[in-house]
Image: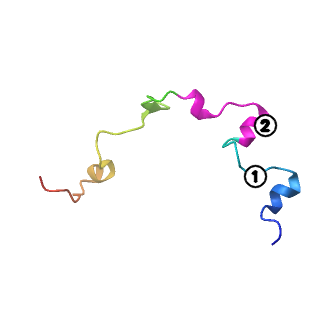
Amino acid sequence: KDNPTPLSSKFGWEVLKDTPTPLSDKIGMQPLKDSRPANKSSSFGFPLLSKNSTPLSSLFGIPVLKKDD
């Protein structure tokens, strides 16, 4: 109860304070967010965003609630 970070203290690790990527920093790796382009539209050949806002419902022909115009 006296130590709020017992596991970190046991291994001599500092708690997250100033760096959001402590493990990457320790081993010298760049985090993914620095190397990935902001305008990426696909991953492994699959689109990240779909033009269809209800893909699963559309696949099974299930009607969804929609806002009246």
Q: Place residue 30 in its image quadrant.
A: top right
- Secondary structure beneath disc 1? loop
Inter-mark Cα distance, 2 to 1: 13 Å
Q: Is residue 34 magenta?
A: yes
In the displayed structure image, the side of residue 65 where residue 35 appears, left or right = right
In the displayed structure image, the side of residue 17 where residue 58 appears, left or right = left
Q: Which residue is mark 1?
A: 15
At label 2, the amino acid type is Lys
Mark 1 closeness class: few <14, some 14–19, many ≥20 residues within 10 Å: few
In this picture, is 1 found above or below 18?
A: below
Mark 2 closeness class: few <14, some 14–19, many ≥20 residues within 10 Å: few
The picture places residue 38, in percent across and down from the top left corner, at 47, 30
In the displayed structure image, the side of residue 10 where residue 18 appears, left or right = left
Residue at 69% x, 42% y: name it: 19
- Secondary structure beneath disc 2? helix
The picture places residue 21, in percent across and down from the top left corner, at 68, 41
At label 1, the amino acid type is Val
Magenta segment, prevailing SS (helix, strand or loop): helix
Q: Place residue 9 in its image quadrant.
A: bottom right
Q: Is residue 53 magenta?
A: no
The picture places residue 54, in percent across and down from the top left corner, at 29, 50
Q: Which residue is mark 2?
A: 26
Residue at 82% x, 50% y: name it: 13
Along the polypeptide, which appears first: circle 2 or circle 1?
1
Mark nearer the viewer, 2 or 1 = 1
Q: In this picture, which residue range is highlighted in magenta?
A: 22-36
In the displayed structure image, the side of residue 32 where residue 18 appears, left or right = right
